Amino acid sequence: MLAGIGKSLAGRYGEKELKTVFGGDFYDFYMLGENTLGFLIADVSGKSIPGAMFMMSAKTVIKSLAESGLSPDEVFTQANEKLCEGNEAEMFVTAWLGYLDLKTGAVRVANAGHNPPILIHDAKAEYVILKPGLMLAEMEEIRYNEQTLQLQKGDILYLYTDGVTEAMDEDEKRYGGGQTEGTPVIW
């Protein structure tokens, strides 16, 4: 069935365009108990049907582990093992997972090689630089670390993928961004 879908789309878009139709960027959010919001942003390597399928697997595995009550670092540690199994295509996932305590503003975080988020506080934007772990599915037996950050009332935590930092205009020139030092540019 998937082969038929691929042939149909390839006929419609052409092989070159088809590679850009399917992306691996994704986000998710879910309540983890009464007072905790889990939120995730991630990006799977490659723009293809296999990349999109790997993205669906990663999203499902991470959500299932988070909803089982594991901490963010344990979610990534176990997700990494599951995603490494049978990964002959050698795909990987960058991901950032946070658990926000809705009462205190404390955020428990694990980072699997993903872009640093931007914190907007009192109308000033700055990168939240936390120690990243390796990307998911890159290597077996990796342990991820949990870190914390504190949000204040009115703060905005802006998470993004390279789809933002690599965006191009119609002449295929990048808009900019991608830096992780200095003051971030918010479009």
Image (tube, rainbow, N blue to C red):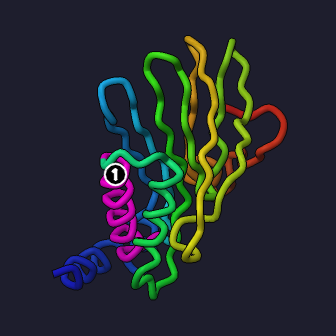
* Residue found at x 31% / y 49%: 68
Which residue is the extreme one toward the left?
1
Residue range corresponding to the magenta coloring: 47-67
Q: In the structure shown, which secondary structural element does the residue marked by tag 1 occupy?
A: helix
* Residue found at x 51% / y 64%: 93
- Given residues 83 and 24, the one toward you in this image is 83
* 82 lies left or right of 116: left
Position of residue 73 measured from the top left corner of the image (x, y, whole percent): 53, 52
Position of residue 162 measured from the top left corner of the image (x, y, whole percent): 59, 54
Residue 69 quadrant: top left
Can you say whether 34 is above or below 97 in the image? above
* Residue found at x 77% / y 46%: 179
Residue 64 quadrant: bottom left
Residue 175 belongs to magenta span: no
* Residue found at x 62% / y 52%: 145
**Camera sees residue 167:** no
What amino acid does circle 1 point to? Lys
Position of residue 160 measured from the top left corner of the image (x, y, whole percent): 56, 44
> Where's the C terminus, which quadrant?
top right
State the residue position of label 1. 63
- Given residues 94 and 108, the one toward you in this image is 108
Can you say whether 166 is above or below 155 in the image? below
> Where's the N terminus, which quadrant?
bottom left
Residue 59 quadrant: bottom left
